[in-house]
Amino acid sequence: MMFNRVYFALFCILTVNAWAEPSVQQAFELVDKKIHSLMAKIEQSKANTIFTDKQKIQLVDAELGEVVDFKRIARRVMAKHFRSATKEQKYAFLAVFKSSLLNTYAKGLWEFNNYKVNLLPLNPTNQTERNTQVSFEVVTSSGQIFPVAQSLFYNKKENKWMVQNVIINGINMGLLFRERFSRLVSQNNGNIGLAIEEWGASGLAQAQNATAERIEESE
């Protein structure tokens, strides 16, 4: 059950698509559209008994790879260490962060069964191009309800809405990942390169386990 909740958290981070205009209402509509589109494609793939892990990753990357601002998220996760990291280290962390997130998400999402997603009415208060929050609930087959607030921003350079963070059951995923990376740097005596290597090996998995534990505590 714990791992399903971890995968659910990743699901909440990655379910968003692009749009041509910076309209808050359109941001709401595209989240609704993308969530159900992705759910439908996953259900279709489950009918294919030889659908491989590689194909799952490719499906997720094709759907979401260009609409999640991994660079923005990775920079926020590195936080103060981003300034002192070399150019090579920044690219290295971006690569391992994106790869580990997509791989874990793709492998775990297929374990979800019989869940529903209910979008909540858009709250017009303090919604901007820099931070528009779309809230929804995920209802599991057992009747458990997980409230989600997804943060999107309008990327003017790319001319589209992109995801930058998500809060699930009050757990700020971006902050959780940032805390984990900072801890890795500290454990490696300030060596950012070693912290990146450890993240690639197990850092994301440990951060996800911490997420699951916090969700358990918040219920």
Image: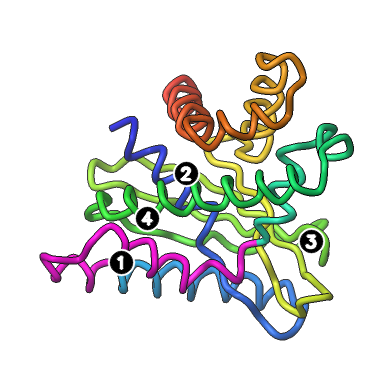
Q: What is the three-letter code of the residue carrying label 4? A: Ala
How far from the left and from the top, in percent, is residue 146? 44, 42
- The residue identified by callout 2 is 9
Q: Is residue 156 above or below residue 102?
A: below
Q: Amino acid at mark 1?
A: Gln
Q: Residue at x 31, y 73 (%)?
A: 41
Choose the circle earlier in sequence order: 3 or 2: 2
Q: Residue at x 81, y 33 (%)?
A: 81
Q: Which residues are magenta?
A: 42-68
Which residue matches tag 4?
A: 106
Whole-angstrom CA distance, mark 1 to mark 2, is 21 Å
- In this rendering, which labeled residue sits more in front, label 1 or label 4? 1
- Could you say whether the residue bearing mark 3 is in a helix, strand or loop? loop
Whether residue 197 sits left or right of residue 86 in the image: it is left
Quarter of the picture containing the N terminus is top left
| In the displayed structure image, the side of residue 37 where residue 142 appears, left or right | left
